[in-house]
Image: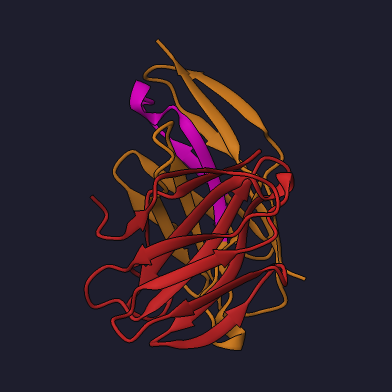
Amino acid sequence: AQTVTQSQPEMSVQEAETVTLSCTYDTSENNYYLFWYKQPPSRQMILVIRQEAYKQQNATENRFSVNFQKAAKSFSLKISDSQLGDTAMYFCAFIAPGAGSYQLTFGKGTKLSVIP
Amino acid sequence: DSGVTQTPKHLITATGQRVTLRCSPRSGDLSVYWYQQSLDQGLQFLIQYYNGEERAKGNILERFSAQQFPDLHSELNLSSLELGDSALYFCASSVSGPYGYTFGSGTRLTVV
């Protein structure tokens, strides 16, 4: 079975500070894709960043970056210069297309609060 | 606007009833995915259609069914509803592959 574990149900960070959200996953596939999604109170699912497992270089999108440790099956998200608009649920997810389907497997999520 | 349209946005119904949730994918996207988000189960994949054909099934109950029509819109049918079916149901679409996944804004189903 493929699983995603987010061990931090809730976190908080001061505005302008840096925070790291943890994620570990388990899969027997060699080819897979990792994602972080943000779900603000509006409930819309928004893609934050993605990483291909075959790429060694960590992905970066503006203030968001990941630390991808393939051997450890770890995929953490770092948010720099946190802003009030970053307050949301954050979901770690992956796609392992071994069976030809690109379904997402999600973790339980981390609720992030940015404090002014 | 993500380009994926889900209707209705909210639905309140009684136990034992049947409802239909509708999803119009982003223009050009051939794949439609349905997900259920509940407090106890989190976000779970239900089913995928690709160009009208069922491609993959996840944790979808037998009381639930779906289809994708020739115009590529999809419907998720939920029958014999139970209190535990109360959840946010998301539809997502993509052209193919793992990229360009776009989610709709969801349908909030409340079973009373």
B64 or B100: which is nearer to us? Answer: B64
Give the residue drawn at x 38%, y 87%.
B51
Image-quadrant location for residue A51: bottom left
Numbered circles on residues, count: 0
Q: Is residue A106 visible?
A: no
Furthest-top residue in this view: A116
Give the residue drawn at x 58%, y 75%.
A96
Image-quadrant location for residue B45: bottom right
User: Residue A106: x, y in percent?
Assistant: 61, 56
- Asked whether residue B111 is drawn in magenta, I would say no
- Asked whether residue A84 is drawn in magenta, I would say yes
Give the residue drawn at x 39%, y 35%.
A42
User: Residue A55: x, y in percent?
Assistant: 46, 71
Q: Is residue B84 visible?
A: yes
A109 or B26: which is nearer to us? Answer: B26
Taking B61 as reference, is B89 above or below it?
A: above
Q: How is the image coloured?
A: by chain
Quadrant for the C terminus of chain A in the image? top left
Relative to A9, is B97 on the left or the right? Answer: left
- What is the magenta range? A76-93
Furthest-right residue in this view: A1
B94 or B77: which is nearer to us? Answer: B77
Quadrant for the N terminus of chain A in the image? bottom right
Relative to A38, is A22 on the left or the right? Answer: right
Relative to B83, is B28 on the left or the right? Answer: left
User: Residue A49: x, y in percent?
Assistant: 40, 53
Q: Which chain is orange?
A: A
Q: Which chain is red?
A: B
Give the residue drawn at x 46%, y 60%.
B21
Taking B79 as reference, is B2 above or below it?
A: above
